[in-house]
Image (spheres, helix red, strand yellow):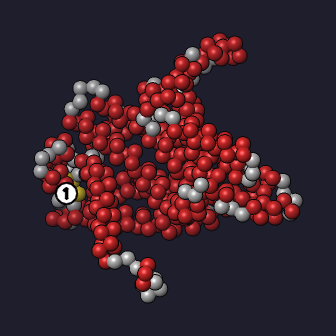
Amino acid sequence: MSDIPRAMRQPFALKFGSAAFLAFWCLLAAFPIFWIAVMSFKSPVDAFAANPFDVIFGPATRAAGDGLSILDIVVGVVVLFYTVKLALGWLPRKVVEWAPGGQVWAGWIIGVIGYALGFVLFFFIVLPAVLGVLNPILGPLGNPVLGLTTIHYQSVWVDNQFYQNFLNSLLVTGGVVTVSLTVGTLAGYGLARSGSNIAFWLLIIALIFRALPHSVLVAGYLPVFINSAEILRPILGENAPTLYGQPLAVIAVLVSINQPFTIWMLRSFFQNIPNELDEAARVDGCTHFQAFRWVIMPVMWPGVITTGLFSFLLAYNDFLVTSLLLDATNQTMVPAIAGYFNRETTTTDQVEAVAAAVSITAPLFLLVMVFQRQIVSGLTAGAVKG
């Protein structure tokens, strides 16, 4: 505190007010996520109970024989604590150490997928089996004290085959992120290193395009996708495919929506990288692309990861484009949740919809938790600087 000049020190009232507002905002933002997570593990009677303590402790769920004992709670908290600790400390080091051929991005993909699968296998299969053997032996410590059931998740993922929607979401988001980052890095690098006025006007046009409502773009693309078989028949013959209802159509539209933002953001990152790095690489005999690939991109990884996360969120959370351009068999997770309310809805359907909503939130927390260092590094490196 002594290092801060007196004139720059904030008064106590301002610091207290800022901290109180931030705490209130965090509580307000986190409460709905916490509440639906609690509801998703209760029977419908408890999930929609008027008494909030019944929702939390689940007496009806516990009376049905479903719940957590003191041992379950203690072991679960310990496992979750070390899961987060390993994800923040051990996993990043091992990704860099074990990355195949020094390709850190491939190491992150493999590491995140492997870590997530290992957690799901241990936490939801191995741990319940072990605790199920120990609880009857421990007497009172093994009796349920907190009502909890996973039947709604089983109904969503197994009976309703929600895993197919999950795979469709991975296909769409993977395609959008891959295309957006590939085009965005090349275009952002070129525009950042260009001194032409044309580059400036291209960015302005891209910004205007990004500001258009999504419904306008969907309305423009929809007739083309519906009539795609007739349009492509002169080229591909009678086997010309219909793009409507296919993930490829959604990827094309979402890339069109997201690409201007991606280019703007990556251009800001490239502008913060000194031109001397390019010049030094060129003096050493690199071509422009080799300088970009081997010198500039290793410095750019925090920016690429940050931009990729925003692209992922756009595609992962999209409702309008996916609901209009995909049929029921290829539907992604977000529009699929709305399907729970399209029939004669019961309280069981509503709790299953809540369980599905919690399911699609979990990967987002995992991504942010694993990549939080790169995201913070990327944002502080000038991603918001234009």
Q: Is residue 182 among what the camera can see?
A: no
For disc 1, the neighbor class at 10 Å (few under 14, some 14 to 19, many from 20) is many
Q: Is residue 185 above or below residue 14?
A: above
Left or right? Give the position of 237 relative to 287. left
Instruction: Give the left or right position of residue 31, taking residue 101 as reference.
Output: left
In this rendered view, identify the residue nearer to me: 170 or 147.
170
Which amino acid type is shown beneath numbered disc 1?
A: Leu
Rendering quarter of residue 187? top right
Q: Residue 70: x percent and y percent?
A: 22, 64
Q: Residue furthest front?
A: 7
In the rendered image, the quadrant that contains the C terminus is bottom right
Nearest the camera: 175 or 239?
175
Looking at the image, which residue is at 56% across and 21% down? 225
Residue at x 17%, y 64% (from the top left corner): 139
Q: Secondary structure at mark 1?
A: strand
The residue carrying mark 1 is: 146
Residue 232 lies, in percent from the top left, at: 65, 17
Q: Residue at x 72, y 42 (%)?
A: 198
Q: Is residue 228 visible?
A: yes
Question: How many numbered marks are there?
Answer: 1
Q: Give the left or right position of residue 226, taking residue 45 as reference.
A: right
For residue 357, what is the image quadrant? top left
